[in-house]
Image (spheres, rainbow, N blue to C red):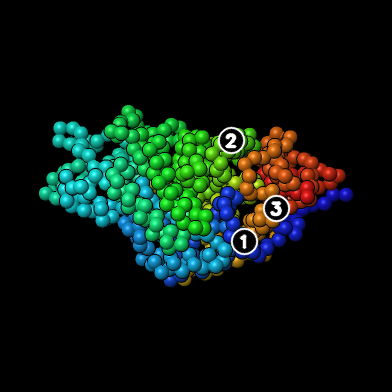
Amino acid sequence: MSQQHSPSGSPLTEAAVATVAAPRRDWWRDAVIYQVYPRSFADSNGDGMGDLEGVRSRLPYLRDLGVDAVWLSPFYASPQADAGYDVADYRAVDPMFGNLLDADALIRDAHELGLRIIVDLVPNHSSDQHEWFRRAVAEGPGSPLRDRYHFRPGKGKNGELPPNDWESIFGGPAWTRVTEPDGTPGEWYLHLFAPEQPDFNWEHPAVGDEFRSILRFWLDMGVDGFRIDVAHGLVKADGLPDLGTHDQLKLLGNDVMPFFDQDGVHEVYRQWRQILDEYSGDRIFVAEAWTPTVERTALYVRPDELHQAFNFQYLGTDWDAKELRTVIDRTLESMRPVGAPATWVLSNHDVTRHATRFANPPGLGTQIRTAGDRALGLRRARAATLLMLALPGSAYVYQGEELGLPDVVDLPDEVRQDPAYFRGEGQDGFRDGCRVPIPWTRAGSSYGFGAGGSWLPQPAGWGELSVEAQTGVPGSTLELYRSALSARRSQPDLGAGDAVQWLRAPEGVLAFRRGEFVCVANTGGEAVTTPAYGRLLLASGEITEADGEAKLPADTTVWWTTG
């Protein structure tokens, strides 16, 4: 006799109200951390832009979802040339998001709900409206403030050429020439991203002093940690040498560059770690470190440096069992010697949502402009989520992925705001598609995001993917996430640890054991039969069990327990 199980076919798969976990040491080793992109999460005042009060109002939702911490993308005072990653004042909240009292209230409410708050820190560059930079330009050549950035005379007969051949990640030269106070063309300054984002010179002691002070400011406010933007970029090679090649973006991720992943960054983080360790509450650093290998990434999380680093190699892996096993093994092997937990992530504010990436053919990278097969993409995304949450270490969830949101690939050109979109030969510039405000309700001017519309247009049918539409619906993606996070908390063999025991499986299938827990993921295009390893905990799609065997459809992940 056979029995069918839907994704909500066992008690653990029903929505469960999460309990507030008691504080524990090393919570970050198996934490599930939810990324909030504030401008697109919830709008409290109806101006079309999300804000801190909006985030605060939705904290109970995040508690009930079952996450451990909330990471907030930048909300600092900023001209918003790059959606807040161009900071003018690191100790102030931009008025579009609220004020410091709102930040304080959000942190306090989160702690009362058992949630931790991680804030973004942007130490590689400031805004060109930062007081230091504005004064450096206004004071002219020889200003001591110019030493806090990378100002250089140009090459050529009249200094008309950039100081070296480095290219901006957003396209074009990585240098912009200033007009001096007397009106003449003058020195050039380095910006690895937009011209409005001049790079700090971390060789200057004032820069380090300032950021150590900024850390203390937010730690005193009560934040539980920092996600470090462009953590690999702070230190540049001595002399700022030419690369000698064009199309430098194609080299990123393949080699150590003179402007990325220089060994000098590690001394900065050792100093920061000493500050963090002075504070109670088990606070953490998380690195956004794009490196050529997971072995290089591991250097950032040695015991006296940072706690976690994003696993971009995993994020960029196609939905393929062989490729996934390779990156999983390399990740665990690389992190084990330094005693750091692995991290796993499928989506964030800079890449195409994985429900859309997996809807397209493999090999297209992490920024994709086509919708692909939506049903296929969602099926794979659900399966990929259960695989990710079954791996040892910490997992990151990007807002809206728990709703199965696809990327919005058909935004009109005139509404786009990604700065890379307006610069040639850089990043694709289509990051707006993953930043469209998320839907909370079936109806309304912005599907519950706020009373005044949304800063990026939401597609028709967005309401059917909303929190309201999916709550309590067996088999919905939201309920799948709630069930998975509840099971993860209740199963002692899920989460922390540094190893998996691989099991024999058909081609295209990953199967591993962790204590009494077994995960099987079918990444292939055909159904497969595997052993039924115990009591069914959760499945991303419908499976059939009979006579000790289980039939898994294509693109399906299953959790069992033998306990």
Question: Relative to 157, does residue 412 appear above or below in the rendering?
Answer: below
Per the rendering, the mark at residue 21 is: 1
**Disc 3 designates what residue?**
491
Q: Nearer the viewer, mark 1 or mark 3?
A: 1
Mark 2 Cα within 10 Å, few/some/many (few <14, many 20+)? some
Q: Residue 269 at what x, y percent from top left?
A: 42, 45
Disc nearer the start of the sequence (3/2): 2
Question: Relative to 257, does residue 473 appear above or below in the rendering?
Answer: below
The amino acid type found where label 2 is placed reads Glu
Q: Disc 3, disc 2: CB below 8 Å?
A: no
Q: Residue 77 at what x, y percent from top left?
A: 34, 60
Tell me what residue is drawn at x 32 percent, y 52 percent.
210
**Disc 2 designates what residue?**
333
In what element is the residue under mark 3?
loop
Residue furthest to the right in view is 1
Tell me what residue is drawn at x 70 percent, y 53 percent.
491
The amino acid type found where label 1 is placed reads Ala
